[in-house]
Amino acid sequence: MTTERTLVLVKPDGVARGLTGQVLARIEAKGYRLVELKLVHAERALLERHYEEHRGKPFFGPLVEFMLSGPVVAAVVEGHRVIEGFRSLAGSTEPTTAAPGTIRGDLGRDWGEQVQQNIVHGSDSPESAEREIGIWFG
Ligand code: RTP
Ligand code: MG
């Protein structure tokens, strides 16, 4: 059995709305294990590294500004196939159309401005997970 680790962020909207406990409860209820956990007000340079793959896209600037707007909760979560497992728990990117039963589908919606307000982030591959865990907990 190969145990994986993934980086999960509760984004500023999730923390501000008091959803951190619900997000962590869903991760634990699924059977995954928290191995690192912290509340941080991230710096711009860190966020620009984290979202490196999106640099140059129209939403990159607004996304970084949004992530700077308040504290985030960063966690390393461990378990067999946790990378795809957490992506499945999170639901698709846009909260309005994310499936009910998912974090974004149950707890998020379009607030009329920012698609990026979708409560959580989860690494999308083993390579991303290793890179992102290094950025947030290295
Ligand atoms: P994440 O990386 O946060 O887990 O989300 P994701 O894979 O579902 O989405 P991704 O394509 O990696 O985009 C990263 C974050 O950028 C914001 N976004 N805004 N069109 C837009 O305005 C737009 N598209 C993406 C979202 O916050 C998304 O989670
Ligand atoms: Mg992504």
Image (spheres, rainbow, N blue to C red):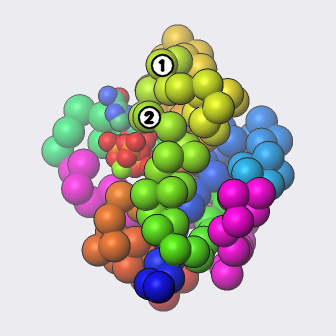
Q: Is disc 2's CB within 8 Å of ligand 1?
A: yes
Residue 67 horizontal side relative to residue 40, left or right: left
Q: Is disc 1's CB within 8 Å of ligand 1?
A: no
Secondary structure of the residue carrying tag 1 is loop
Residue closest to the far left? 56
Can you see residue 40?
no
Residue at (51, 57) in percent of width and height: 85
**Extent of the magenta region:** 27-55
Residue at (69, 74) in percent of width and height: 33
For the residue marked with disc 1, what is the amino acid? Thr
Residue 21 drawn at (x, y percent)? 82, 52
In the picture of the structure, the residue carrying the numbered disc 1 is 97
Q: Quadrant of residue 134?
A: bottom left
Residue 62 horizontal side relative to residue 69, left or right: left
Residue 88 drawn at (x, y percent)? 50, 46
Q: Residues within 10 Å of mark 2 (few under 14, many from 20)?
A: some
Residue at (48, 19) in percent of width and height: 97
Total marks shown come to 2
Tell me the number on the disc at residue 92. Answer: 2
Q: Are marks 2 and 1 in contact (CB under 8 Å)?
A: yes
Ligand 1 positioned in quadrant: top left
Q: Earlier in the sequence, mark 2 or mark 1?
A: 2
For the residues marked 2 and 1, what is the alpha-carbon distance in whole angstroms?
8 Å
Residue 17 drawn at (x, y percent)? 77, 36
Residue 131 drawn at (x, y percent)? 35, 76
